[in-house]
């Protein structure tokens, strides 16, 4: 495994280095500590700061490669991840405001949408990673994200909660609501939601990870944070998918943006398989399950 930790050498970047150290140590990952100087006169002090961060990582048994580049941070991170293969990119995510569409530094969202590897936004004073909350949506195209989470959870000895939040459905889906309230029956049912959740649970268990499946009803982002608080989770996993068009980019939905805005713990934005090619009716059926007989 190969991890890229992005740092500007300032105290606000320390969560990225700290979380990166936890993951790199557990996964025995090759680690690159990357700094980008936007001005030539910043290169020397930035390298000095990164060398100190590297020393703190070495104390944990990690021997990072320190790389300092010059230029626009987004373009340089994009170039680095396009030229070299990384399994994970870790960035800082300092909060700038408490309202509007984007509460954190704009660079946080730009990196997530620009680069191909999964991105972990280091938020809060995280000292351990042992309880993961995965917002699955109950969809099959989140499976790559679940697998990545499973690798990290297995290495760290963390437990995983698979969370599906269902908005209040039309009356015709009342039978599915009753089914969801009986979790065991849901996982054994032939509904797409049940099949996908069971498949995700079993794939994590094959990695030796302890898994719990949780179903909630209500406003999705509110229920995600209610579950995070109740379960004392210290990592939230959400998804993004590749957008359409000639230029490669990744689509960050409203839920992912809202989670990034409001989170007080690290958020892993994992790439999901695209739902491209599905019509609106197929997506609706996957959200609410089969029509009752």
Image (cartoon, grey):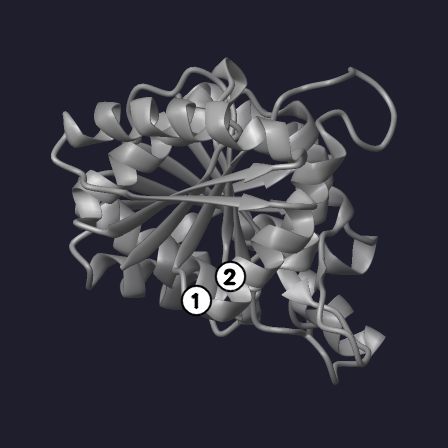
Q: Residue 72 or 247: which is nearer the viewer?
A: 72
Residue 109 pos. (x, y %): 70, 42
Q: Which residue is mark 1?
A: 84
Residue 71 pos. (x, y %): 66, 46
Q: Residues within 10 Å of mark 2 (few under 14, many from 20)?
A: some
Q: Residue 43 or 277: which is nearer the viewer?
A: 43
Does residue 33 sit above or below 262 in this rendering?
below
Residue 224 pos. (x, y %): 59, 33
Residue 214 pos. (x, y %): 45, 42
Q: Which residue is mark 2?
A: 81
What is the count of numbered marks?
2
191 horizontally vs 127: left or right:
right
Q: Can residue 106 be seen from the camera position used here?
A: yes
Cβ–Cβ under 8 Å for marks 1 and 2:
yes
Taking the spot 23% from the left edge, 51% from the top edge, the residue there is: 29
Q: Identify the image quadrant of residue 223.
A: top right
Does residue 11 sit above or below 276 in this rendering?
above
Q: Identify the image quadrant of residue 52.
A: top left
Quarter that holds the N terminus = bottom left
Q: Residue 85 or 226: which is nearer the viewer?
A: 85
Q: Can residue 167 be seen from the camera position used here?
A: no
Q: Residue furthest right?
A: 100
The local secondary structure at tag 1 comes to: loop
Label 1, label 2: how many angstroms apart (C-alpha)? 5 Å
The local secondary structure at tag 2 comes to: helix
Quarter that holds the C terminus = bottom right
Taking the spot 50% from the left edge, 55% from the top edge, the residue there is: 118
């Amino acid at each position: 495994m190969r991890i890229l930790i992005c740092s500007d050498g300032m105290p606000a970047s320390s969560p990225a280095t700290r979380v990166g150290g936890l993951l790199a140590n557990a996964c025995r990952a090759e680690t690159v500590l990357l700094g980008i100087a936007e001005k030539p006169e910043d290169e020397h002090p930035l390298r000095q700061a990164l060398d100190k961060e590297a020393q703190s990582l070495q104390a944990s048994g990690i021997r990072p490669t320190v790389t300092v580049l010059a230029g626009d941070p987004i373009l340089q991170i994009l170039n680095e991840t396009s030229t070299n293969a990384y399994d994970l990119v870790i960035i800082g995510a300092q909060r700038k405001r408490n309202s509007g569409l984007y509460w954190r530094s704009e660079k946080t969202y730009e990196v997530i949408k620009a680069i191909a590897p999964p991105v972990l936004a280091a938020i809060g004073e995280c000292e351990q990673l042992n309880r993961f909350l995965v917002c699955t949506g109950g969809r099959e195209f989140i499976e790559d994200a679940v697998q990545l989470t499973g690798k990290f959870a297995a290495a760290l000895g963390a437990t995983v909660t698979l969370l599906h939040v269902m908005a209040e459905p039309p009356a015709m889906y009342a039978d599915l609501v009753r089914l969801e309230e009986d979790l065991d029956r849901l996982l054994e049912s032939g509904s797409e939601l049940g099949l996908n959740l069971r498949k995700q649970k079993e794939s994590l268990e094959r990695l030796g990870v302890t898994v719990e499946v949780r179903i909630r009803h209500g406003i999705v982002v509110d229920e995600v944070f209610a579950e995070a608080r109740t379960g004392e989770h210290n990592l939230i996993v959400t998804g993004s998918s590749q957008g359409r068009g000639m230029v490669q980019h990744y689509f960050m939905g409203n839920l992912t943006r809202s989670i990034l805005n409001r989170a007080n713990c690290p958020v892993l934005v994992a790439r999901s398989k695209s739902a491209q090619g599905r019509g609106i009716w197929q997506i609706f059926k996957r959200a609410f399950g089969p029509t009752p007989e």
